Amino acid sequence: MKTFMSRAAFAGLLLGASMLATAATPAPKGAEVFIVSPEDGATVSETFTVKFGVKDIALAPAGDMTKNTGHHHLLIDVDKLPAEGAPIPNDANHMHFGKAQTQAEIKLAPGKHTLQLELGDSGHMPFDPPLVSKKITVTVK
């Protein structure tokens, strides 16, 4: 019986911890994220600079637990936003800027591409509601 109670208590702790781990960070009221440049519809070279902007939220490196802060993730050619309750992926289509960068030089193949920003919290999780920019299209020459 003692073993059963110990296992039940341990299971309860794990369940509680997992629920806390997936709880989304509330987005600060009025917070916005946007792409400063390039402009929607712009023609750019294969290597170009994307400048990021925020309003009513501060930037902080990944891992920094300061309230009302986050960091940028650049979504390239992404049709569907990352899943709620899971970290934003880190791959060729989801670039992480966990040092609180405000711009990045990126290289894309020639053709049309979409760009969108999503702000993540200290653990790369989307805010609730998600803080995403308007999706823009660029043509790489």
Image: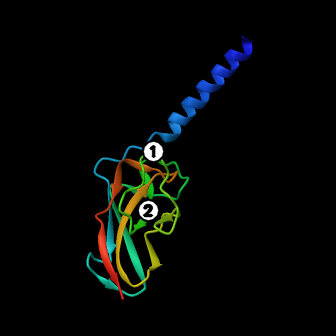
Q: Which of marks 2 and 1 is nearer the N terminus?
A: 2
Crowding near pointer 2: few (<14 within 10 Å), some, many (20+)? Answer: many
Q: Residue furthest left?
A: 41
Q: Which amino acid does label 2 sit on?
A: His
Q: Residue at the spot x=46%, y=78% of the render? A: 106
* SS for dot 2: strand
Which of the numbered marks, if any, corresponds to residue 32?
none
User: Does 6 appear above or below 81?
Assistant: above
Instruction: Give the residue at mark 1.
Output: 85
CA neighbours of label 1 inside 10 A, class few (<14), some (14 to 19), many (20+): some
- Of 117 and 2, nearer the camera is 2
Q: What element carries label 1?
A: loop
- Where is residue 135? Give x, y as percent: 30, 66
Q: Quadrant of the C terminus?
A: bottom left
The image shows residue 70 at horizontal and vertical percentages of 44, 55
**Viewer-nearest of discs 2 and 1:** 1
- Which of 24 and 62 lies nearest the eye of the viewer? 24
Where residue 72 sits, quadrant-wise, is bottom left
Residue 125: percent from left, percent from top: 47, 50
* Amino acid on which the number 1 mark rests in the picture: Gly
Q: Mark 2 points at which residue?
A: 72
In three-dimensional space, the C-alpha distance between marks 2 and 1, rounded to whole angstroms, equals 17 Å
- Above-or-below relation of 68 to 22: below
Residue at 50%, 58% in the rendered image: 89
Q: Do the residues labelled 2 and 1 touch (CB within 8 Å)?
A: no
